[in-house]
Image (tube, rainbow, N blue to C red):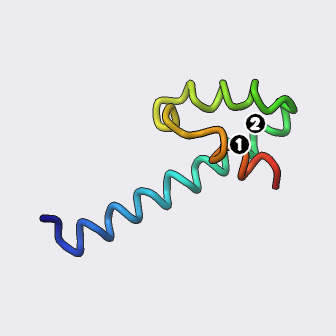
Amino acid sequence: MGSYADAMENKGVEKERADGLESIVRSLKKYISDFDALYDVVIENKNYSKVTKDQVMKYFED
C-alpha cells in the first residue's frame, strides 16, 4: 500500500511527463506538419513510446 507521499510523487511524475510531451509535440510541429510522421518520431523516444495518438493529437491540434 502506497503512502500519500508516493501518490503525490507519482502525480508529479505524470505531470512532468505530460508537460514534456506537450513541449516535444509543439516543437516538432514547427518542422513536421504531417501528424502520423510526427507521432512516429514522438514514440521513438523511450519516455513516450507508449503514448497514444489521442494524447499526441491533444497537443498537435492546439
**Quarter of the image holding residue 54?**
top right
Which quarter of the rendering shows the C terminus? bottom right
Residue lying at 75% horizontally and 36% vertically, measured from the top left: 28
**Quarter of the image holding residue 8?**
bottom left
Give the labeled residue for mark 2: 28
Q: Position of residue 14 (x, y in %)?
A: 44, 57
Q: Amino acid at mark 2?
A: Leu
Q: Position of residue 20 (x, y in %)?
A: 57, 49
- Whether residue 15 sits left or right of residue 41 in the image: it is left
Question: Outermost residue toward the bottom?
Answer: 4
Residue lying at 71% horizontally and 42% vertically, measured from the top left: 25
Which quarter of the rendering shows the N terminus? bottom left
- Whether residue 7 sits left or right of residue 22 in the image: it is left
Residue lying at 58% horizontally and 56% vertically, measured from the top left: 19
- Whether residue 14 sits left or right of residue 54 in the image: it is left
Q: Are marks 2 and 1 in contact (CB under 8 Å)?
A: yes
- Tell me the element at label 1: helix
- Tell me the element at label 2: helix
How packed mark 2 is, by other alpha carbons closer than 10 Å (few <14, some 14-19, many 20 or more), is some
Q: Position of residue 23 (x, y in %)?
A: 67, 49
Residue lying at 17% horizontally and 65% vertically, measured from the top left: 2
Q: Nearer the viewer, residue 29 or 60?
A: 60
| 7 up-or-down from 48: above or below | below
Give the labeled residue for mark 1: 25
Q: Amino acid at mark 1?
A: Val
